[in-house]
Amino acid sequence: MDEFFTSNPGMSSRVAHHLDFAAYELDELTAIGWLMLDQSRYYLSEDAEEAFRQYLTSQMDQPLFANARSVRNELERARLRHAHRLASDLHRNWTRDDLMRLEPADILDATPTCCWNATNHEGTRAAGQVLGCARGPTGRRDGRRPGRRIAPDRRIRGVQGRRFIGVTREQDRLWVGSMPEAYERWLAPSVFRPFAQDLARRAARLAPRKVLELAAGTGVLTTELLTALPAADVTATDLNAAMVGFGSRQAPGADWQQADALDLPFGDGRFDLVACQFGVMFFPDKPAAFAQVRRVLAPGGTLLFTTWGDVGMHGFATALVAGIERAYPEDPPVFMATVPHGYFDLDQVVADLSAGGMGDVSVEAVTLDGYAASAADVAAGFCAGTPLRMELAARGDLAEGTKVVAEEMTARLGAGRVTASMTAYVVEARPSPRLPG
């Protein structure tokens, strides 16, 4: 817009309001890329994520870098290179994961997207050519980075708070890049496996033949279901392509596919059991999800799911929240309390089930102990392996924030091996005789 107003004298004075927006930071651009890829059912391998960040770093200070538009353009080219790479070897038996996963070669072969050869009148790019420019590194003629004209100590919070407000719901449901590995390494053994084993035992008592798992993640519950139900057909689903790819390697005995719980791609009455471990909290429309469960359940089928209790009923989560508040005292992320631990009102749970056509509801509070090698491991798992990562990265250096969180958690839980009690609700329900609504 600076260029436009400079080229059109007098135009600037005819516009009543002028707003300057700060350029996106690297972590913000990366998060935008994750959202774009997830919506198109692609994801970056861990190495490709690093390559993508390196690419963005090399482009951010180029004169015509277009922030999110440049991210979109590069990802579209990466998908084309990915398709060409796979099509060049048609004799290979490509897996579903191969079709969804972008690798470093799909990123590193990129031609800079913002550098154009001014002597080429047909508008073709000059590969790798960076032209000199009288403007500053981000397009301003005075060399300043674009930004709001407000005090520096308020600028970052103001920009980031507004920038992410429109994508919070989608961001809260997103596991991408290296997050599944961090989740599986640090959180699965200490936080999720104890409840997975309990839920699998409950599932075994029902003796289902066909099982559908929603929000299967890295396959923690899937693995336990396969062990407890060796004769059953288990279909594991997750909204996020990165989780489906990772989970299918962790629990290959299940049939994995990407699916939205609000629009399940299965026929009516197909499953005897639908199971979901700590996933319903992330469904943006819970009655709609329960209505989908009712549709795919066979007559007499059962829904089994777990949801966390209040954050104060979870030793690790309580210490984590304290660490987050210490690391970000002015603007602490509220993800833990509002999403994973935000669905503990049992009256609301029962009402949502009823609205989705589910009845015969029973709820049991279950408290189990979690064990971890250190509080720092738990901090690393939550900060790097859940959507909390995006909220922390939007507020500053992720590694430094994680370090402060780990210090506070260690102060509260102790050094070395740590133990914490965790309370969740196990909910069992069956289709009501009458359809919802």
Image (tube, rainbow, N blue to C red):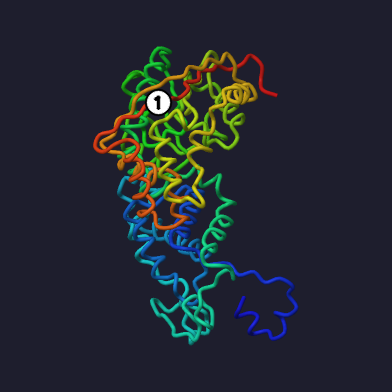
In this picture, is 166 found above or below 154? above
Residue 84 percent across, percent down from the top left: 39, 59
Front-most of 409 and 282? 409
> Would you call the spot at circle 1 few (<14 residues within 10 Å), some (14-19), or many (20 or more)?
many
Q: Residue furthest front?
A: 411
Between 333 and 188, which is closer to the camera in this rendering? Answer: 333
Image location (x, y in percent) of residue 140: 54, 79
Q: Residue at x 61, y 31 (%)?
A: 288
Task: Say which quadrant the N terminus sits in.
Answer: bottom right
* Residue type at numbered disc 1: Val
Location of residue 96 in the rendering, given as x and y in whole percent from the top left corner: 39, 43
Q: Is residue 52 left or right of residue 273?
A: left
The quadrant of the image that shows the C terminus is top right
Residue at 48% of width from left, 22% of height from top? 425
Query: Is residue 95 something one can see in this rendering?
Result: no
Above-or-below relation of 293 to 170:
above
Q: Return the residue at label 1.
A: 234
Q: Position of residue 45 (x, y in %)?
A: 35, 51
Q: In terms of secondary structure, where does tag 1 sit?
A: strand
Residue 11 visible in the shown view: yes
Residue found 33% across the figure and 40% down from its top: 411
Count of number-bearing discs: 1
Please say if 126 is above or below 344.
Answer: below
Residue 374's place in the image compared with 222, above or below, is below
